Image (spheres, rainbow, N blue to C red):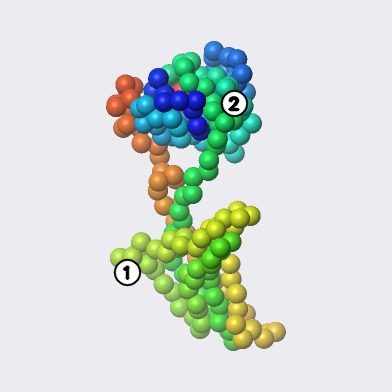
């Protein structure tokens, strides 16, 4: 989320924040978020969507408007407001393919990371076998395709060669989410922001 300027007040990592045209309490906001990352004096704050009523994560609400006020459950009313309707820029997090098991009959199978600009091969498989990358001290195969038109970047697609009507294949893949982005927020950084360090997901108070 983009702010109207360098933040005067710090956000607490893990707190709930809300946005609205005019409000002074979190619960009176129109859109709700959990702070997952912030650096003192920054012009942006990292957030995820939050269902304030049911206290659970949900798809982010990008309907906030330019100059909406921002209120934190811990940090209170902020001097800076929402800029450019929040400019909620999506982070591109990574996923690794870590294990593959396969059995093919009569054909070869190509597996690719999809990308609107360039697709990249993960593997070309024939016969049968298994492949454990962590077992060979290799973390895995990350997304190295490019281009995200149509939100295709990171999709996995399969193609076959020399396939006849009776040919078949079975492929089982293990994928692992890779930090940053999927891990627990770095609550230790709250010590630098002037807040206590508490390791509870969503520091509501």
Residue 105 lies in quadrant: bottom right
Q: Badge 1: few (under 14), some or many (20 or more) residues near its Cα, within 10 Å? A: few
Q: CA distance from mark 1 to mark 2?
A: 51 Å
Instruction: Using the image, determine if residue 189 lies above or below residue 170.
Output: above
In this figure, which residue is indicated by the disc labeled 2?
Answer: 66
Instruction: Using the image, determine if residue 19 lies above or below residue 171.
Output: above
| Quadrant (top left/top right/bottom left/bottom right) for the C terminus | top left
Give the residue displayed 62% in from the left and 27% down from the top. Answer: 65
Task: Measuring from the top left, give residue 154's x and y in whole percent.
Answer: 53, 58
Residue 161 lies in quadrant: bottom right
Residue furthest to the top: 24
**Circles 1 and 2: CB atoms closer than 8 Å:** no
Instruction: Using the image, determine if residue 74 lies above or below residue 167.
Output: above
Give the residue displayed 40% in from the left and 39% down from the top. Answer: 184
Task: Measuring from the top left, give residue 61's x and y in whole percent.
Answer: 61, 34
Task: Measuring from the top left, give residue 77's x and y in whole percent.
Answer: 48, 15
Foreground label between 1 and 2: 2
- Tell whether 90 sits left or right of 13: right
Q: Is residue 41 visible?
A: yes
Q: Badge 2: few (under 14), some or many (20 or more) residues near its Cα, within 10 Å? A: some
- Tell whether 55 sits left or right of 15: right
Give the residue displayed 57% in from the left and 74% down from the top. Answer: 170
Helix, strand or loop at mark 1: helix
Task: Measuring from the top left, give residue 167's x and y in whole percent.
Answer: 64, 83
Count all numbered tags in the image, as a single digit: 2
User: Is tag 1's residue or tag 2's residue first in the polypeptide sequence?
Assistant: 2
Q: Nearer the viewer, residue 120 or 81?
A: 81
Helix, strand or loop at mark 2: loop
Q: Is residue 11 visible?
A: no
In this figure, which residue is indicated by the disc labeled 1?
Answer: 136
Give the residue displayed 43% in from the left and 18% down from the top. Answer: 75
């Amino acid at each position: 989320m983009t702010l109207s300027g360098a933040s005067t007040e710090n956000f607490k990592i893990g707190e709930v924040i809300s946005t609205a045209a005019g409000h002074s309490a979190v619960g009176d906001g129109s859109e709700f978020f959990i702070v997952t990352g912030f650096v003192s004096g920054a012009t942006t704050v990292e957030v995820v969507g939050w269902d304030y009523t049911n206290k659970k994560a949900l798809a982010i609400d990008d309907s906030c408007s330019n100059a909406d006020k921002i209120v934190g459950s811990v940090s209170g009313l902020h001097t800076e407001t929402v800029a450019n309707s929040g400019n909620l820029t999506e982070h591109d997090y990574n996923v690794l393919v870590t294990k593959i098991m396969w059995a093919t009959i009569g054909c070869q199978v190509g597996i690719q990371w999809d990308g609107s600009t360039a697709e990249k091969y993960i593997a070309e498989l024939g016969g049968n076998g298994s492949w454990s990358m962590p077992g060979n001290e290799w973390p895995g195969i990350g997304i190295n395709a490019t281009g995200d038109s149509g939100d295709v970047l990171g999709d996995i697609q399969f193609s076959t060669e020399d396939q006849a009507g009776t040919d078949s294949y079975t492929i089982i893949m293990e994928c692992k989410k890779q930090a940053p982005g999927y891990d627990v927020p770095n609550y230790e950084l709250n010590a630098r922001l002037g807040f206590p360090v508490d390791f509870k997901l969503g520091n509501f108070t």
